Amino acid sequence: MKILVCIKQVPGTSNVEVDEKTGVLKRDGVESKMNPFDLYAIEQALCLREEYGGKVDVITMGPPQAKSVLLEAVYMGADNGGLISDRKFAGADVVATSYTLSQGIRKMGEYDLILCGKQTTDGDTAQVGPETAEFLGMDHMANVQRILSVQDHAVTVEANMDRYLQQVKIPLPCLLTIEKDANTPRLPSYRRKMAADESCLQIFSIRDFADQDEKNYGLAGSPTQVERIFPPQKNTSKEIFEGDPDLLTTTFVRILGEKKFI
């Protein structure tokens, strides 16, 4: 069984500057880490390999330093990694990102199953996984918290639909996004870290893709643009009221009414 996991390097802090002209995050020089949700997708892939055999590859899109999250995945147990990196991909929204990932996945090869984390901590859209599947022409399911079985060229999953759990049987190949409570991710192996090197990684640029039209990537290929982005204003003012409970109740109701909360 060939499995590919899509992962991402995200800022390791919430104190990140924003480019006022483009509205995108300034990632250069910012401490980074693997997107926490992707750890569950990697663990799920490794568990499936242990049960059904095969291989697990990982892929990410980002600057050259994003190789670190690929290597982290290799230390956890992944076989190979692919880095999609080109300045022409910078500033991509979810559509352009998904399209770029689909091109990179086609370059990596054919897979029975593609797994993604439910969402990323820097974007929180939860759209890239399903949109990537659409560009690949592949069936997909989001919010998967359990993979029940893989047989007869199909995978049966249990998805968390908030108010109920849904069981779905999906033909392979397909793409699944994995919930954060699906498993407990393993730690990277020190032995694998000592034995691994970057020879297991491939780097792809736009020149490696079947579609090399620059209008389909980065800011140029993004149908959505950020008009304005700014940090939220912090209000630290407070009032303390003391006195008779009945009087305080009347005062609070009046204040809530004035502020149009009630």
Image (spheres, rainbow, N blue to C red):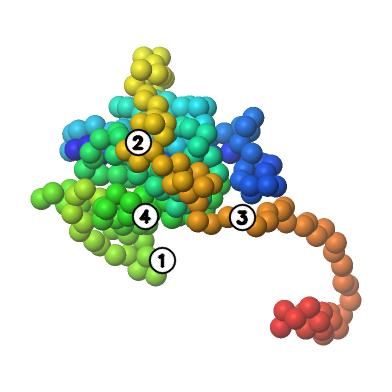
Q: Amino acid at mark 4?
A: Pro
The residue wearing badge 3 is: 226
Residue 2 x, y percent position in the rendering: 22, 37
Q: Amino acid at mark 2?
A: Phe
Q: Amino acid at mark 3?
A: Val
Is 106 positioned to the left or the right of 238 in the image?
A: left
The residue wearing badge 2 is: 209
Q: Residue lying at the far top in this picture: please name it.
A: 195
Q: Compute the Cα span from label 1 to label 2.
A: 38 Å
Q: Compute the Cα span from label 4 to label 1.
A: 18 Å
The residue wearing badge 4 is: 130
Which residue is at 32% across, 38% downward? 210
Q: Compute the Cα span from label 3 to label 1.
A: 30 Å
Task: Please say whether residue 162 is visible from this viewpoint.
Answer: yes
Is 27 positioned to the left or the right of 215 in the image?
A: right
* Circle 3 or circle 1, nearest the eye: 3
For the residues labelled 4 and 1, say whether their Cβ atoms are less than 8 Å apart: no
Q: Compute the Cα span from label 3 to label 2.
A: 27 Å
> Disc number at residue 162?
1
Q: Earlier in the sequence, mark 3 or mark 2?
A: 2
Crowd tier of the residue under label 1, counting other residues whose Cα lies within 10 Å: few below 14, some 14–19, many 20 or above: few
